[in-house]
Image (cartoon, helix red, strand yellow):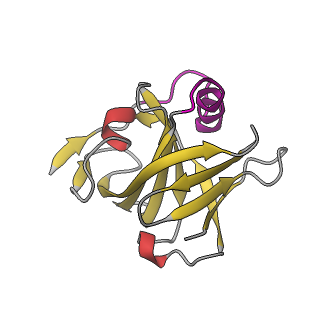
Amino acid sequence: MVNYKILPADAGITSEQLLMQQAKREKNLHFAIREHAAARAGKHLDLVIGDPSASEVADFVIFRQPSLTALQKGRKYLAQEQELHDTADFLLGPIGVTNVIEEGYGKGTWKIVARGNVEQVENKHSFILTSSKFQFQFYRFNPTQRRWYLVRMK
């Protein structure tokens, strides 16, 4: 097991803002989905998206979903925006290795279960996430609300 700490959020920038800034600058966005067993929030999934060469990535939580295989094709899952995280730990870490967050709200264990490439759809708040086994659409339906959705397509 490897121990990690969550970085404090950058002053004034949200995960959504970081994601949209990186999408404008970079065509090399990647994603990782983590199964996270947190002491306070319980078992859920985390979706991390960003530029692998940047220092921070955007993070979103999909509550009440204990595993990637529990996601049903075609069903829409609410994704709640979280604070920014360190790229190396949360996006580029090895798949299947159990890690530990020792303190804070996310305290518990996690492991990356899927990783892949991100394609922005028509320069909007919509992305296609593709790995070797899965494909997802990640989007914000209403620009005036901060709700993001994840839909398993494959």
Q: Is residue 32 visible?
A: no
- Residue 114 horizontal/vertical position (percent): 39, 58
Start and end of the magenta stretch?
Answer: 8-27
* Residue 89 quadrant: top left
In the foreground, 35 or 139: 139
Left or right? Give the position of 102 relative to 75: left
Please identify the quadrant where the C terminus is shown: bottom right
In reply to whether residue 52 is colored magenta, the answer given is no
Quick one: which residue is furthest to the left in this view?
Answer: 1
- Residue 22 horizontal/vertical position (percent): 58, 28
Question: Which residue is painted at 49% across and 71% down in the image?
Answer: 65
In reply to whether residue 21 is colored magenta, the answer given is yes
Question: Which residue is painted at 45% across and 65% down in the image?
Answer: 44
Left or right? Give the position of 11 relative to 39: right
Asked if 106 appears above or below 71 in the picture, the reply is above
Number of marks: 0
- Residue 111 horizontal/vertical position (percent): 30, 57
Question: Which residue is painted at 17% across and 46% down in the image?
Answer: 2
* Residue 74 quadrant: bottom right
Asked if 150 appears above or below 68 in the picture, the reply is above
Question: Which residue is painted at 51% across and 56% down in the image?
Answer: 130
Asked if 89 appears above or below 60 in the picture, the reply is above
Asked if 138 appears above or below 133 in the picture, the reply is above
Q: Is residue 30 visible?
A: yes
Left or right? Give the position of 38 relative to 138: left
- Residue 71 horizontal/vertical position (percent): 52, 74
Left or right? Give the position of 11 relative to 55: right
